[in-house]
Amino acid sequence: VYEQFAAKLPRFGAPGVARDTIAAIFQLTSDPELPVRVRACTCLQSFVERRNDAEVYRAIVDNLGPLLERLLRTISEIQCEEVAFTLETLVSCFPQEIIPFAAQLIGHLAAQVCQIADSSIGDDDDEDDGTECAA
């Protein structure tokens, strides 16, 4: 529900409401249940897109490191395009703020690519037709 309002309202209620809402959603990104975490991560995208709202901007920037970590962890658990799109939106909307976390972000993304490549190679081994790729 919040993500629908966040995208459409020019202002998100009284002062402090957006900050408290983002804090609550942020808490849900570490919920024990994966579906709850995925929904919370995707819901954050609407708030990330409101980066011109000073209250939203401050709430996101203050939690940027842990937020990136939780998004990356969720993506590693389940390759969900919506969560990846939230991460992409976060990086594109906050490019200067992401800089201190760039090495960590690239390391996690490189590990994800390797994990996907390894699982893809494992799938190909199951269908081995006798040909091999020379490295």
Image: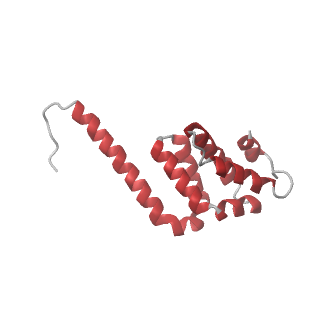
Residues 9 and 29: in front is 29
Apparent side of residue 86 relative to residue 51 in the rendered image (left or right) = left
Q: Nearer the viewer, residue 51 or 123?
A: 123
* Residue 30 as seen in the image, left or right of residue 125: right
Instruction: State the colouring used for the structure image.
Output: secondary structure
- Can you give x and y, in whole percent of width and height, for residue 119 in the image? 32, 40
- Judge whether residue 53 can be spotted in this image: no
**Which residue is more in the foreground, 4 or 61?**
61
Residue 115 position (above or below residue 51): above
- Residue 118: x percent and y percent? 30, 44
Q: Is residue 51 left or right of residue 17?
A: left
Q: Is residue 34 above or below residue 44?
A: above
User: Number of callouts in the render?
Assistant: 0
For the point 61% across and 44% down, the residue is 42
Q: Residue at x 59, y 67 (%)?
A: 97
Place of residue 18 in the rendered image (x, y in percent of width and height, measured from the top left)? 77, 54
Outermost residue on the front side: it is: 32
Q: Residue at x 76, y 54 (%)?
A: 20
In the figure, is residue 18 to the left or right of 81?
right
Q: Which residue sits furthest right?
A: 14
Locate the N terminus by quadrant: top right
Give how far across and how far down residue 77 sits, in percent: 47, 43
Q: Quadrant of residue 90?
A: bottom right
Name the residue at 63% across, 61% down: 63
Q: Is residue 54 visible?
A: yes
